[in-house]
Structures are given as C-alpha cells and as structure tokens.
Image (cartoon, rainbow, N blue to C red):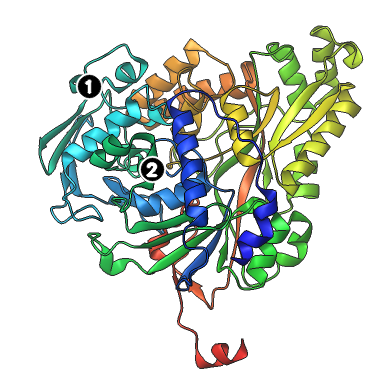
C-alpha cells in the first residue's frame, strides 16, 4: 500500500467522458476501480512474482475499447485471440487457433480452434465466441476505435457503418464449434498478425450479456488468456494471476504479476531503484534529464521499434483548416533540437510518418526545417509576421518530457512565426477524451505499430477510422489505402501507399511527424529474463520471469 499512500492525493476530481456506450464502459470501469480500491486493502497479500511499472491508470480493460499501449499490455495477459505474438519476433503464432489454412487467392482463411482451449471458469471456448467477439467490435453501439482492424473482413465495414444490418452477412462463420471460416475483401498478408491484436481477442458473451457495461466486475471474470484478473485497485495496482486452465499453462512463467500505475517519471524511477518494481518500461516514466547517467547502467536497455511521435491538427477549427497554416507550423519545428536537447535517448528526427525498419516499404519525404518558407506561407494565409493569428492551445498529457517539448514548440513558433500558443496539460484520461472529442487545437500524439506493415500507420487516417481525431477526410487517400491493401505485387503496393503517405505528410498535412521512438526500458538482467526486443515493442507477460537469486546475490541485499 506504499504506492497507494504516495499517490492518493493526486486523484483527479473530475473525469469527463463522451456520452454514449463507450462512456458507460468508461464510467463502469471507474466505478469498478472504486470498488476494488476498498477491497482487501487491510488484509495481507502474497508477494507478486513480477512487478511492473506500467504508466497511467487504465481507462478500461475491455479489449474492444482499449486504445493505449499500457492498457493493452494488461488486456493481452487476460484475453487471447486466434493468434498471439511471438515474444522474440512479435510475429503471429498460434493462439486459441492451433492452425489455419489460407486459400490460394489469399481471401479465405480457415482457423481450427484448440479443443483444449477453455475459459478460466472451465467452459469451452468455441468459434461462436469468436464470431460474437468480432461482431461486438463492429457493432456501432460498442463504439470501438479499433473497429477498422476488422474492415479487411467481407462486409465488416458496411456492418460497422450501419449500411448493412444483418450480421450474418459479415464474412466470419462458425462452421462447427472448432472450425472458423473468414472471408476477406481481398488478400491481406498481415491478417494473421491482426488476429493477435487485442481488439480481436475473444471475450465472454454470457458475462457481457448478463452484466452489460459492468462485465469486467464479474466475479469470477472469465478470461481467455494466460492470466485471470485478481483485483484492480485505483491508484494502487492491478494484479493478475496465472490461469490454471489455460491451454499453455505449462509455459506461463509467473503465478502473480502486479501492474503499478504512475505518471511521474521521478516517482517511477525511485520505485524501481528502491526495488519495489522489477521492470520500468514506459519511456515517459524515465527522467530525460538523467538519461546521460542512467543510459550507462547495465539495467538500461535500448532498442529500435516501430513508433512515431507526431502532432495532430484539428481541421475543424480555424485557422488550422488552412493547409498553409499547418505547413508553416510544421516547417518551423527544429526536430533535431528536440531529440538532442529533450528526449536524448537515441530518437531520430522524423519528416515522414511510417518509421524505417520495414523491408517492404520506404516512406516518401515530408517537410524539414524551413522557417523562411514557413513565414511566407503564413503571410499568404493572412497572418504576416503572425499578426492577428488567434491564440491557440497545444494539448499534451502529463509528463516531464512532453511538457518540455510543449515549451520548446511554444518558443519555436513564437520566435519564428510570431504566433501565440498556450500550453494545455491534461491527465491521461482527460487527454485521450479531449482527442476523441476533438476538443483541442494542436495535439501531441504518438503511434506504435500494431503489426509489421505500413498499413498499421497509414490506415489510421482513413475517413472512417476511429483513431483519426483530426477531422481530415480525403476520398483519394481512402481509395489509395484500399487499393494498396488489395495489391499482391509488393513493389506496386509500395508505390500506391507512398502516394497515400504523400497526401498525409506533404500535400494535406493533417499531422506532422516529429521523431521516431527509440525504445528504453529498465530491468536487471541478472534478475529478470524473457524480455526480447522487437519492432512492435511487445513483451508478453507470460514469457517474462524472475530468476532465482543466487546465494551471493541474496546475501548482498
């Protein structure tokens, strides 16, 4: 309870949620947190085998609604899909499906579920559960931001948009309890990888239908993954416990795992240094000012992965509906200055959106640092020297690094363009709600690849994608993304997607990239094993374990 005591005073007084089904889920999640907060606080608890500092308090653990990487780490431990991620390569390997076949044209998939796959409560997991879970994501009432991950399935997009009312016409069919047939709109080489994404995980229909938006409070909560939810206590911890009925229980490395919330980098590092946590793996929870020293330690691990830090413009607000204004702002960002002075962890300045490292794709160039051209563009837009440019806000979530970047952007735009910018810092939940509700002018954003393909970055800005958050709609862009994903020739596909990215980062510019992430996480290699560095920055909890201490190391503590 030391962590709880240290942060109880930071509980936000008000959380704002958009009205609708997603809001009910969010409110239910907060309600459940309050319940868990007071359950078991006074009784003694067994010590966890592994303790992880995981970032901000989750908004939900519903796979259909999760949109934040820190939340998805916990969700992946609780709920599994047809495939799962290889801990070393982050490529798709068999999960609830033990095997699958693909038709020669790449359109039809036949998945065969494991006959020994059961819910943590003992009932068998069947193809009917998969069909229900996917249709629930597509149901407009669910309001899943990641519903687009299923739009590769025939008629899925039409059903999600409400154009098609009959769910039986969606291309996912239960042939029998253990055989699932999926028909796609076209060849999708990364579809098996999509099936490992948390949105496509299998969730318990009976529990959801019984409890509605409060289903995560069910006791016991049926889970399909390697762990069960022991408890969730607000601003204290989330504890998961090994699922003894999981089909791969023999390879689950830990009995109990604790996830600690936190948004203060100094507090997180202090907890880790005090050995109250085994892993610190949220980059924002590592003090950037100390990286020169911390980076030399043997427990600091750096690696490259598919992640981009970028800015969104709200095109529904003036003057950001003018592309000349957006280009002027983009051209006065000294990206090199940001990575060298602030982030300082090996990040690379970015002028395009899709990171390097994909052998199948190379991005087109975007805008670099060009303040002279930027000033001319701003003058053309009617704001010479920044005169009469309306005050605007830059939205970012709480964190020292993000705050420093905000201050740096404020100075750059004031010095080079003469325009006023206000800094708007928000707690994580308020920050994400503001993005979702388009309640911002310019917003800090980031994206980590969900699978190793450029589509995981580019399809986010299609007109109907739930993660767009810019107000930008471009039919040509939508058409190019769809055409590219149907193209079997990799070279032709690359050229089509490059045209789309050019619209995104050069012609229309609803976003502007700032830098590519460099992974940094802390753990003691003599104490923890099973952490592998891959391009998706995914580290399945079930594969990580504490080493048994040697007599020498045990006596030194």
Asked whether 450 or 551 is in front, the reply is 551
Asked whether 371 or 404 is in front, the reply is 404
Dot label at residue 2: none
Locate the N terminus by quadrant.
bottom right
- Furthest residue toward left: 176
In the visual, does 478 lie left or right of 328? left
Asked whether 242 or 69 is in front, the reply is 242
- Where is residue 320? Give x, y as percent: 71, 15
Q: Quadrant of residue 240?
A: bottom left
- Where is residue 480? Give x, y as percent: 44, 18
Dot label at residue 198: 2
- Where is residue 49? Give x, y as percent: 45, 72
Residue 198 vs 415, above or below: the answer is below
Q: Residue at x 68, y 13 (%)?
A: 317
Disc 2 + disc 1, Cβ < 8 Å: no
In the visual, does 40 lie left or right of 511? left
Residue 225 vs 204, above or below: the answer is below
Q: Does residue 92 show up?
A: no
Q: Secondary structure at mark 1?
A: helix
Q: Quadrant of residue 66?
A: top left
The residue beneath circle 1 is 167
Mark positioned earlier in the residue sequence (2 or 1): 1
Residue 367 vs 554, above or below: the answer is above
């Amino acid at each position: 309870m030391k962590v709880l005591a240290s942060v109880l005073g930071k509980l936000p007084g008000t959380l704002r949620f958009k009205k609708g089904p997603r809001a009910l889920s969010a409110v239910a999640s907060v309600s459940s947190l309050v319940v868990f907060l007071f359950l078991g606080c006074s009784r003694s608890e067994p010590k966890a085998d592994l303790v992880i500092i995981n970032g901000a308090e989750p908004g939900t653990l519903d796979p259909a609604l999760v949109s934040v990487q820190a939340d998805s780490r916990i969700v992946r431990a609780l709920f599994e899909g047809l495939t799962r991620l290889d801990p070393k390569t982050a490529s798709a390997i068999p999960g609830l499906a033990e095997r699958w076949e693909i038709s020669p044209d790449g359109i039809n998939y036949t998945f065969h579920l494991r006959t020994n796959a059961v819910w943590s409560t003992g009932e068998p997991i069947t193809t009917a559960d998969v069909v229900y879970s996917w249709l629930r994501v597509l149901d407009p009432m669910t309001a899943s931001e990641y519903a687009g991950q299923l739009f590769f399935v025939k008629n899925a997009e039409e059903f999600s948009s409400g154009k098609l009312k009959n769910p039986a016409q969606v291309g996912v069919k239960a042939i029998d309890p253990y055989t699932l047939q999926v028909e796609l709109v076209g060849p999708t080489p990364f579809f098996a990888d999509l099936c490992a994404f948390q949105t496509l995980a299998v969730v318990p229909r009976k529990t959801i239908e019984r409890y509605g938006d409060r289903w995560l409070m069910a006791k016991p909560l049926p889970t399909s993954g390697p762990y069960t939810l022991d408890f969730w206590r607000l601003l204290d911890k989330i504890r998961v416990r090994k699922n003894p009925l999981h089909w791969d229980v023999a390879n689950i490395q830990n009995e109990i795992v604790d996830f600690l919330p936190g948004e203060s980098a100094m507090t997180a590092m202090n907890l880790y240094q005090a050995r109250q946590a085994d892993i610190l793996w949220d980059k924002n929870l590592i003090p950037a000012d100390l990286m020169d020293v911390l980076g030399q330690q043997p427990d600091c691990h750096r690696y490259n992965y598919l992640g981009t830090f970028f800015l969104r413009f709200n095109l529904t607000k003036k003057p950001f509906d003018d592309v000349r204004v957006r280009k002027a702002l983009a051209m006065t960002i000294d990206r090199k200055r940001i990575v060298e002075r602030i982030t300082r962890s090996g990040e690379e300045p970015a002028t395009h959106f899709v990171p390097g490292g994909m052998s199948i794709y190379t991005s087109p160039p975007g805008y670099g640092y060009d303040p002279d051209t930027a000033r001319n563009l701003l003058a053309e837009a009617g704001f010479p020297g920044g005169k009469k440019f309306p005050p605007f806000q830059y939205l970012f979530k709480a964190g020292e690094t993000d705050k420093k970047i905000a201050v740096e952007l404020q100075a750059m735009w004031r010095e080079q363009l003469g325009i006023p910018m206000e800094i708007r810092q928000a707690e994580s939940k308020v920050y994400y709600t503001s993005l979702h509700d388009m309640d911002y002018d310019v917003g800090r954003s980031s994206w980590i690849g969900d699978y190793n393909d450029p589509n995981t970055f580019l399809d986010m800005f299609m007109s109907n994608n739930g993660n767009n958050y810019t107000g930008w709609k471009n039919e040509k862009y939508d058409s190019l993304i769809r055409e590219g994903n149907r193209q079997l020739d990799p070279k032709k596909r690359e050229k089509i997607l490059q045209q789309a990215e050019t619209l995104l980062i050069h012609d229309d510019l609803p976003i502007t990239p700032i830098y590519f992430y460099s992974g940094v996480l802390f753990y003691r290699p003599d104490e923890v094993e099973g952490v592998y560095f891959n391009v998706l920055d995914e580290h399945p909890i079930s594969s990580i374990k504490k080493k048994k201490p040697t007599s020498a190391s045990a006596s030194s503590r």
